[in-house]
Image (cartoon, rainbow, N blue to C red):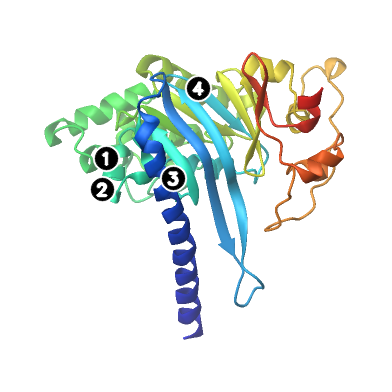
Amino acid sequence: MHISSEVQYQRNRLHRYFSTHQEDHTRSSLRVSQNHMSGRDNSILLEVSNLKTHFPFGGRWIGNQQFIRAVDGINLDIKRGEIVGVVGESGSGKTTLGRSILRLVEPTGGSVWFDGIDVMGLSGKEMRQMRKRMQFIFQDPYKSLSPRMQIGQLIAEPLRLHRIVPEEKVADRVVTLLGKVGLNPYFQHRYPHEMSGGQRQRIAIARTLALEPEFIVADEPVSALDVSVQAQILNLLLELQQSEGITLLIISHDLAVIERIVNRIVVIYSGRVMEIAGAAQLIETPLHPYTQALISAVPSGRPAKRKPRAQVTTEPSRIGKPLKGCPFAPRCAEVQSICWEEMPRLESKNNEHEVACHVRQTS
């Protein structure tokens, strides 16, 4: 009885919290929609504006209600056919950002526009249709594939659910999709546990391609794989992007994994964008101290040419206690007084290289 009342209490609290923010979003969405299409750049497929996803916790028996700000005001534009990498350490908000864009997690506020369509304003039925155009590759393919279904059934499921092809052509389409990801047709009769990690990830990609999406979010697609298999999967994603014209958002904590296939890299920390630049430019001339720390942490095969590690301190626990200024200030070796008082804005330094850092903006 106590458990039931607590569950109901938490449900009501969450409902009140998200209802309030949904009303705020509806008002802002109506204002934006009036002039969004007139000034829109057709080369941009995805526009993310001030996106926020906060998770409430505490209250009643666990102190005052607070919020984990997993995504806290992110702005991002992605062009058609572009491959964008999102990097950051564990807990920085990378996965929540990807899931919020596709509304696998309902955002608290902000807007997401996909090809001129307000994703946040779509109903459940409309969002289901949008799933054909926006897809997600999960980090662990073994957990995202039902162990009770054969590979052929797993790939055929989205084809039947969205009626992509007539029933009599489903089997041929399954074979075609297996071929696209480099697997033989006889794999369709196997179960997920009979396949290797790399093969399971290929199956997950085949399921995603079944709907012929225009935009794919790949969440740590190679983090659980061996180095040799990582290269195979990354090359597969690159080949599919080039042949199908798919726009990709690749999430990773490892700069070394994605730097060779992405066009741009977005560095996020504590739910906020720290730096955005072309892949080569960011690797060669990182501006933000956090980006420098990430790059210096990448293992090098040439110890003699290895650069000194960027110095950062251990982050203090501040769950539910957001800083007034820069979220990286407690760990930054170059911190100044303004960093504690004012949140830095993302500003362009040179040649589309953007950074949110008081120190760099004044230098």
Contact between marks 2 and 1 (CB within 8 A): the answer is yes
Q: How many marks?
A: 4
Q: Is residue 193 above or below residue 225?
A: below
Furthest-bottom residue in this view? 1
Which residue, given by chain and number where applicable, does mark 4 sit on? 83
For label 2, the SS is helix
| Callout 1: SS | helix
- Cα–Cα span, label 3 and label 2: 22 Å
Q: Position of residue 226 (x, y in %)?
A: 60, 31
Q: Which mark is residue 125?
A: 2
> Looking at the image, is mark 3 or mark 2 nearer the viewer?
3
Picture coordinates of residue 350 (x, y %)? 68, 15
Q: Is residue 14 left or right of residue 307?
A: left
Q: Nearer the viewer, residue 346 or 33?
A: 33
Distance from the alpha carbon under mark 2 to that under mark 4 = 29 Å
The residues bearing labels 4 and 3 have C-alpha atoms spaced at a distance of 29 Å
Sequence-earlier tag: 3 or 2: 3
Whether residue 125 sits left or right of residue 16 in the image: it is left
Can residue 72 be seen? yes
Question: Residue 66: which quarter of the image?
Answer: bottom right
Inspect the image, locate mark 2, and give the three-letter code of the amino acid beneath it. Answer: Lys
Name the amino acid, label 3: Ser
Contact, CB < 8 Å: mark 4 with mark 1? no
Distance, label 4 to label 1, CA atoms, is 24 Å
**Residue lying at 19% horizontally and 38% vertically, measured from the top left:** 163
Q: Residues within 10 Å of mark 3 (few under 14, many from 20)?
A: some
The quarter of the image holding the C terminus is: top right
Q: Is residue 211 above or below residue 11?
A: above
Closer mark to the observer between disc 2 and disc 4: 2
Nearer the observer: mark 4 or 3; the answer is 3
> Sequence order check: which comes first, mark 2 or mark 4?
4
The answer to which of marks 4 and 3 sits earlier in the sequence is 3
